[in-house]
Image (cartoon, rainbow, N blue to C red):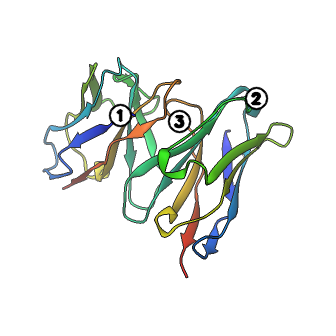
């Protein structure tokens, strides 16, 4: 199975900061990667799919990049409502899905 | 509007069984793979199992293989997860989600607690 490793596991930043979270796959996954945001006590929310496609309704300060094994989620200007845990997820119809361990973002 | 409503969670002793259900509405259920994802208290998300539109293909994470079985009733628009030989480490909120890849639509989850 593919393993997904996120870093850092947590971070603290200020409002307006640029925040970057990385996700590394144990083998190449092309661009079959999604990012989710999960606020405390809430259901995960899809932010990005196909590594860089922004889900409808998601603020443009969120962006994703990468292909193969290395991926990045960027929040261009951190807002108070962005406090949450962020997860990457690889997907492939022939394999089982795998989530990263999560990155907790605090202000 | 897509709606997914899980039910069937609760407290069960180690070694026991539970069957979770996920009632779907607002989309053509029989046209979509469905997936189970779980989240242990205070922990991250874990992909558990998925099932093809017609039920002919199923995949499971290694930790539940041989103990959990997913199935579906397309006429009733319901997804199931039969969980046997439950262990303490199966304690989690169990979510159903639409699709096999990335998940736009999730249920609210049902809590399964395995404890004596």
Residues packed near mark 2 inside 10 Å, few (<14), some (14 to 19) or many (20 plus): some
- Residues marked 1 and 3, same chain: no
| Residue B33, quarter of picture | top right
Q: Nearer the viewer, residue A65 or A78?
A: A65
* The C terminus of chain B: image quadrant: bottom right
Q: Nearer the viewer, residue A91 or A107?
A: A91
Q: Tell me residue A17's x, y (percent).
A: 13, 42
Residue under the point 51% across and 29% down: B101
Q: CA distance from mark 2 to mark 3?
A: 21 Å
Task: Check the image and report above or below for B84 versus B102.
Answer: below
Task: Check the image and report above or below for B21 versus A71.
Answer: below
Residues packed near mark 1 inside 10 Å, few (<14), some (14 to 19) or many (20 plus): few
Q: Give the chain letter at badge 1.
A: A
Tell us which disc is closer to us: 2 or 3: 2
Residue under the point 63% across and 71% down: B10
In what element is the residue under mark 2? loop
The residue identified by callout 1 is A59
Residue under the point 75% across and 41% down: B72
The residue identified by callout 2 is B54
Q: Tell me residue A54's x, y (percent).
A: 39, 26
The residue identified by callout 3 is B104
Q: CA distance from mark 1 to mark 2?
A: 36 Å
Q: Is residue B3 left or right of residue A21?
A: right
Q: CA distance from mark 1 to mark 3?
A: 16 Å
| Residue B19, quarter of picture | bottom right
């Amino acid at each position: 199975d593919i393993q997904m490793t996120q870093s850092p596991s947590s971070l603290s930043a200020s409002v307006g900061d640029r925040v970057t979270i990385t996700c590394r796959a144990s083998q190449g996954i092309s661009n079959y990667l999604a990012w989710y945001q999960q606020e405390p006590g809430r259901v995960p929310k899809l932010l990005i799919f196909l590594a860089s496609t922004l889900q409808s309704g998601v603020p443009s300060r969120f962006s994703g990049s990468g292909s193969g094994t290395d991926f990045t989620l960027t929040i261009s200007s951190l807002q108070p409502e962005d406090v949450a845990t962020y997860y990457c997820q690889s997907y492939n119809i022939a394999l089982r899905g795998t989530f990263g361990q999560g990155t907790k973002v605090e202000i | 509007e897509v709606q997914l409503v899980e039910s069937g969670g609760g407290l069960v002793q180690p070694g026991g069984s539970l069957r979770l259900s996920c009632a779907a509405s607002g989309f053509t259920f029989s046209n979509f793979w469905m997936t189970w994802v779980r989240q242990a208290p205070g922990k991250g998300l874990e992909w558990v199992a998925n099932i093809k539109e017609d039920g002919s293909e199923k995949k499971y994470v290694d930790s539940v293989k041989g103990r959990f079985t997913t199935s579906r009733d397309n006429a009733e628009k319901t997804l199931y997860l039969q969980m046997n030989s439950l262990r303490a480490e199966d304690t989690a909120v169990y979510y159903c989600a639409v699709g096999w890849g990335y998940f736009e639509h999730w249920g609210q989850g049902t809590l399964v607690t395995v404890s004596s």
